[in-house]
Structure formats: structure tokens, C-alpha cells
Amino acid sequence: MENYWKAQEVAAALQISAQTVYRYVANEEIPFHKLNRSVRFKPSEIERWVESKAAGVLLPRKLVARTEGDEA
């Protein structure tokens, strides 16, 4: 089972502020999961999201999460 990251861990990995991560969440620009009242991130989904942005492809958050299970 993959560990989930907190917003601060995503921010550190992407070298951006946690505030920017939360803004991406609010705009549903980044793949995330709500666990109770917390926002968490799967590292593999974040990696795929970054790769899609680098390639200039707009990949909706829901599609990123859905394709995660397809790779198994």
C-alpha cells in the first residue's frame, strides 16, 4: 500500500509553498484525496500529474486517480 503525503510533503517535493498546493486543491488542479477532513496525496498520482504538466497535457484530477488502478 502506498503511503499518502500531506500538503507540506507535496510542497517540499515540488519546491513550492504549501499555500500553492492548497490553492491547487481548491481549484481541483492537482490529484488529491479527502480522508475525513484532511487532504492527502498519493506520490504516484503527483508524479503523473507533474509529468502531464511538463508534457503540456491537461490531465484532470479524476482521470489521474482513475488510471492509477489500471496499472496493476
Image: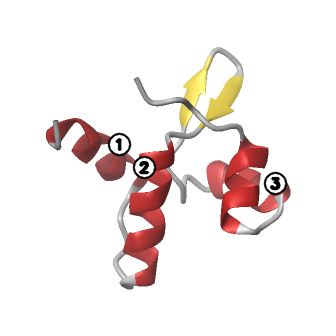
Q: Does residue 30 appear to the left or right of 48 in the view shown?
A: right
The quadrant holding residue 19 is bottom right
Q: What is the three-letter code of the residue carrying label 2? A: Glu
Badge 3 local density, few (<14 within 10 Å), some, or many (20+)? some
Mark carried by residue 4 = none
Crowd around label 1: few <14 · some 14–19 · many ≥20 (10 Å):
some
Q: Earlier in the sequence, mark 3 or mark 2?
A: 3
Q: Which residue is mark 2?
A: 45
Q: Amino acid at mark 1?
A: Ala
Q: Residue at x 53, y 29 (%)?
A: 3
Say which amino acid is labelled 3.
Ala
The residues bearing labels 3 and 1 have C-alpha atoms spaced at a distance of 21 Å
In the rendered image, which residue does mark 3 sit on?
A: 18
Left-right relation of 13 to 28: right
Q: Residue at x 54, y 59 (%)?
A: 29
Tag 2–tag 1 contact (CB < 8 Å): yes
| Extreme residue toward the top, this view | 36
Q: Residue at x 64, y 49 (%)?
A: 25
